[in-house]
Amino acid sequence: MEKVSIGIIGGSGLYHMSGLTDTQEIAVDTPFGKPSDNFIVGKLEGKRVAFLARHGRGHRILPSELNFRANIFAMKMLGVEKIISASAVGSLREEHRPLDIILPDQFFDRTRGRISTFFGEGLVVHVSFAHPVCAYLGDQLMTASAQSSVPVKRGGTYVCMEGPAFSTVAESNVYRSWGMDIIGMTNLQEAKLAREAEICYATVALVTDYDCWHPEHDAVTVDQVIAVLNQNSENGQKLIRAAVRVLDNQRPCKCGSALKSAILTEQSHIPAATREKLALLIGKYLS
């Protein structure tokens, strides 16, 4: 199959990609199991892209149940080098209003026990994650924002909570006191695994609500979230289409060589089964 270099992950409310043509549905099996759904591969703005509904079509999979490793590894198998990940989020700041679009550049982990690495089983790898979002991909998204007239805010910290329940008021206020900007349930693991897979990654965060800290929004409901998502989906898709249009083949970032100095285990001690399982990720670094 022809290589697909651009991947799009659609979150809550974004289960398809408008404008995608010449599509084919592709099932991908990975060493880590099956992804959330089959990939829809087709042409968007004249370029081949692979679209994945993060929670499955029909929204069947809880955040805690997502097979993040399979989702990202499958992208790598398809040849993806850049992932744009759309995600519904709550706002922890007055200035981030519902319907705003934010490109966070930091993450803070409040999940419990999720698997967020491909490694282990005799192979120790520590990637750099100080800057979890690809700055070059962020630059291209900002160019897309200007060209599409879809305003976005760049920067800020995404708190990744476990869920599936929304926050308590106490939790929400603590996150605000820490200086966090937005809150969601999925993107941290994606970002970590994309870095390990040497894929550029950026989040397009669609603000749906003020979380429960706001005096006029003391409870978050699914109906509220979906209603705002439906309004914001058009702008989110417009931005992503523009981003695909401006994306080039360059990768001046360090994402594509993230494992170069990250493998600690001596080659002679890496189990053969692990070598084989992760050959797609580490093969180029092994003699």
Image (cartoon, grey):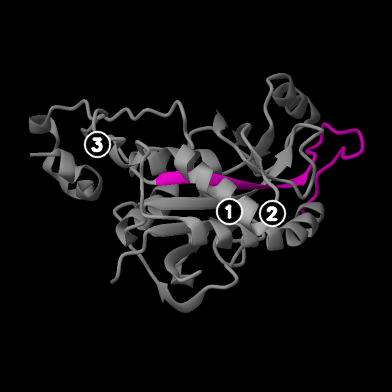
* Image coords of residue 188 (percent x, y): 52, 38
Which residue is rendered at x = 34% and y = 51% of the image?
32
Residue placed at 46% from the left, 51% from the top? Answer: 83
Indicate the quadrant where residue 181 lies: top right
Task: Residue under label 2, please give it.
Answer: 150
User: From which residue to which does the magenta span run?
Assistant: 200-222
For the residues marked 2 and 1, what is the alpha-carbon distance in whole angstroms? 8 Å
Q: Which of the pair 59/225 is nearer the observer? A: 225
Q: Could you tell me the amino acid type at mark 3?
A: Glu
In this figure, which residue is indicated by the disc labeled 3? 121
Q: Earlier in the sequence, mark 3 or mark 1?
A: 3
Q: What residue is shown with label 1?
A: 144
Left or right relative to 237: residue 224 = right
Q: Are marks 3 and 1 in contact (CB under 8 Å)?
A: no
Where residue 134 is drawn, which disc sits there? none
Q: Is residue 91 left or right of residue 44?
A: right
Figure quadrant of the N terminus: bottom left
Q: Position of residue 134 (x, y in %)?
A: 46, 39
Q: Which dot, 2 or 3, sits closer to the camera?
A: 2
Q: Contact (CB < 8 A) between labels 2 and 1?
A: yes
Tell me the residue at 44%/68% (across/down).
38
In the displayed structure, 95 sits above or below 35; it is: above
The amino acid pointed to by label 2 is Val
For marks 3 and 1, give the CA distance.
Answer: 41 Å
Which x, y percent locates residue 183?
A: 67, 37
User: Around disc 2, counting alpha carbons within 10 Å, would you say few (fewer than 14), some (14 to 19), or many (20 or more)?
Assistant: some
Q: Which numbered disc flags the more N-terminal residue, 2 or 1?
A: 1
Question: Residue at coordinates 33% horizontally, 54% vertically from top-left?
Answer: 76
